[in-house]
Amino acid sequence: MPFKGITVFLLISFVYHNSVLGQIDTVTVSLNDSSKVILERTLWDSGSQKVESYEGRFPYAIDGEIIYGTDGDLPSSKLTSVKLFIGKESYELETKGMFNPWFLDYFNGEHFILKPYGIKGFKLLAYFSDGAGTYGAEWKILEKSSIRTILTNEESILFEYFENQFRD
C-alpha cells in the first residue's frame, strides 16, 4: 500500500502549509485619518530560549518573562514589532512577552483604539487573541517617548477597564 504513505505525507504537508505558510505575519490598522499601527509577528522557535513551566507541562515564562497569549501550550508565534505612526511621528512600542497575537490569517483590527492622554499625549489600547489566551495591552505616548503601562490577561481588567475604554 504505497499510496497510503503518499496520502498521509500529502495530508501532513497540506495541514503544515495552511497552518504555517498560510499565515498573515504583518498587518496594518488604520486608527484614524492621521494614525496607524503596523504589527509584525514571527514563528516562535524555542531554540536556545529557557522555557519555565508548572509541573513540567504548563509553560508560564520564557527567558524569565511571563508569557501572554497562550492557554497552557507553548506559543506558535511571537509579536515582534508594533510600530505606531501619528502624523509624521513614529514609535516602536514594547512587545516583550507578547505571543500568539492573532490566529493564522484572521486578524481583527477593531480591537485597537487610540485615545488622547493628557495635554499632548496618546494611549493605544489593544486586544490580542488567537482564539485562546486573550490579553490586552496599553501603551502611553508622550512627545517622543512611549511606555507599555498594561499587559494583562486578567479577565476583570480586560472586561472592566478595556471594555469601558472601547465604549467611550
Image: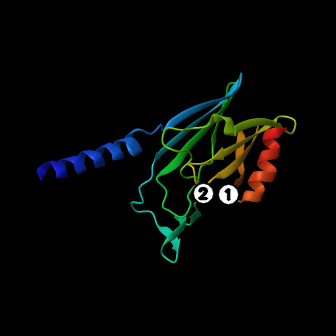
The crowd level at tag 2 (other Cα within 10 Å; few <14, some 14-19, many 20+) is many
Going by the picture, which residue comes out furthest to the left? 1
Q: Which residue is mark 1?
A: 153
Q: Position of residue 114 (x, y in %)?
A: 75, 35
| Element type where label 1 sits in the image | loop
Q: How many marks?
A: 2
Say if mark 2 contacts mark 1, CB within 8 Å. Answer: yes
Q: Position of residue 45 (x, y in %)?
A: 41, 55
Q: Give me the residue at 68% from left, 25% from top.
A: 88
Give above or below for 67 relative to 41: below
Q: Which residue is mark 2?
A: 68
The crowd level at tag 1 (other Cα within 10 Å; few <14, some 14-19, many 20+) is some
| Element type where label 2 sits in the image | loop
Side (left or right) of 81 relative to 157: left
Q: Amino acid at mark 2?
A: Tyr
Q: Nearer the viewer, residue 83 or 23?
A: 23
Q: Give me the residue at 60% from left, 40% from top.
A: 82
Going by the picture, which residue comes out furthest to the front? 1
Side (left or right) of 34 relative to 121: left
Give above or below for 21 relative to 129: above
Q: Give me the residue at 71% from left, 60% from top.
A: 154
Give above or below for 48 relative to 35: below
